Image (cartoon, helix red, strand yellow):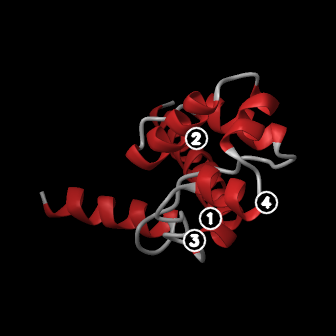
Amino acid sequence: MLTNLCLFVNVKVYKMRNKHLLLLKKIDERTKPLRAIKNIVPHSGWIYSVRTSLNITLEQLGKMLNISRQSVSGLEKREVLGTITLNSLKEVANVLGLQLVYGFVPKNGTFEDLVEKKAKQIARK
């Protein structure tokens, strides 16, 4: 009876590890294109850079967003400061016919590498 229980637990753990590995591989595959484009945010922020590249004034973008030109300027400043919300970025992207893309990528290597590094740290302890 104990042998069957141990076998069941080992199979369960094995299946969980395999599922975890599959999830890691999936997230690594999905983020692979993003890992290649680190540090691409323009110094002046995306809103300002796209707006000026498309030759859109603060007033014009404000009208598109139903806000004042001063509010658009505030959005641009908040983006540079890192205090803008994702919803605000999505709204700006939407009125400009763009799609906001965001995600998390490891600073170095892959998600599998992160898990392996953490496992080694735990093993050392």
Instruction: Tell me how far mark 3 sits from mark 2, CA to CA.
Output: 33 Å
Q: Which residue is mark 1?
A: 28
Q: Residues within 10 Å of mark 1 (few under 14, many from 20)?
A: many
Instruction: Tell me how far mark 1 sits from mark 3, CA to CA.
Output: 9 Å
For image coordinates 46% across by 42% down, the residue present is 77
First reached walking from the N terminus: tag 3 or tag 4:
3
First reached walking from the N terminus: tag 3 or tag 2:
2
First reached walking from the N terminus: tag 1 or tag 2:
2
Given this view, does label 3 or label 2 mark the residue nearer the observer? 3
Q: Which residue is mark 3?
A: 35
Tell me residue 32's x, y (percent).
Answer: 65, 71
Given this view, does label 1 or label 4 mark the residue nearer the observer? 4
- Label 2 amino acid? Lys
- Label 3 amino acid? Arg
- Label 1 amino acid? Asp
Horizontal placement of 123 versus 76: left or right?
A: left
Q: Which residue is mark 4?
A: 54
Contact, CB < 8 Å: mark 3 with mark 2? no
